[in-house]
Image (spheres, rainbow, N blue to C red):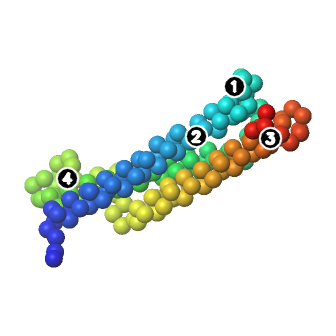
């Protein structure tokens, strides 16, 4: 059974929408996770942390790594969303391009717009997922170091859950 060009385009659109919605979820969760270290530090360490922010516990590499990874997950998710929609847009207009409308907006191929016709978009999607999970792992490592870490003033190992 072969598909018509319209059916094929509809299926591609549905797939792009499904993957785009998933990428949007990763972007939203990554964005929310960027604020978690600040909120968690304030909840665990109290008023002093609220006044001094993360300076109280310092900024370990796990926090820098988590923030960097989550920002990269957001960036790759946005690139994936744009490029996948752009690809379907280009395919739709290529199917309907004629000699009469080839110079009209929407049908002409602008030289200054990036076209990723042959690029594997799964690389962007995979990078988004990789950096998301690395960021979450590092975020959990940072929170664990807060729960079982050293008091920044005395240097004594403290279990914050027992306070």
**107 horizontally vs 128: left or right:** left
Whether residues under marks 2 and 4 lie with C-beta atoms below 8 angstroms apart, the answer is no
| Disc number lying in front (1 or 2) | 1
Q: Which residue is mark 2?
A: 34
Q: Secondary structure at mark 1?
A: helix
Q: Which mark is residue 50?
A: 1
Local crowd size for mark 3, using a 10 Å CA cut-off: few (<14), some (14–19), many (≥20): some
Q: Position of residue 157 (x, y in %)?
A: 86, 42
Q: Earlier in the sequence, mark 2 or mark 4?
A: 2
Q: Is residue 65 visible?
A: no
Q: Earlier in the sequence, mark 3 or mark 2?
A: 2
Q: Secondary structure at mark 2?
A: helix
Whether residues under marks 4 and 3 lie with C-beta atoms below 8 angstroms apart, the answer is no
Where is the N terminus found, in terms of image quarters? bottom left
Is 56 or 99 nearer to us in this picture?
Answer: 56
Local crowd size for mark 2, using a 10 Å CA cut-off: few (<14), some (14–19), many (≥20): many
Q: Position of residue 70 (x, y in %)?
A: 56, 47
Q: Is residue 67 visible?
A: yes
Q: CA distance from mark 3 to mark 1?
A: 19 Å
In the figure, residue 130 lies in which quadrant?
bottom right
Q: Which residue is mark 4?
A: 107
Residue drawn at (72%, 23%), measured in percent from left and top?
47
| Disc number lying in front (3 or 1) | 3
Whether residues under marks 3 and 1 lie with C-beta atoms below 8 angstroms apart, the answer is no
């Amino acid at each position: 059974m072969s598909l018509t060009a319209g059916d094929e385009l509809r299926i591609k659109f549905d797939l792009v929408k499904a993957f785009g919605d998933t990428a949007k979820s990763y972007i939203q969760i990554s964005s929310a996770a960027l604020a978690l270290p600040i909120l968690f530090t304030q909840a665990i360490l109290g008023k002093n942390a609220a006044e001094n922010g993360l300076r109280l516990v310092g900024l370990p590499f796990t926090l820098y790594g988590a923030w960097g990874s989550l920002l990269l997950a957001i960036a790759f998710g946005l690139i994936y969303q744009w490029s996948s929609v752009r690809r379907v847009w280009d395919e739709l207009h290529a199917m309907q391009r004629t000699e009469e409308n080839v110079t009209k907006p929407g049908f002409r191929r602008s030289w200054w717009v990036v076209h990723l016709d042959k690029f594997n978009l799964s690389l962007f999607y995979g990078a988004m997922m990789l950096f998301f999970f690395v960021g979450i792992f590092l975020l959990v490592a940072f929170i664990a170091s807060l729960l079982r870490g050293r008091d920044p003033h005395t240097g004594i190992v403290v279990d914050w859950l027992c306070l």
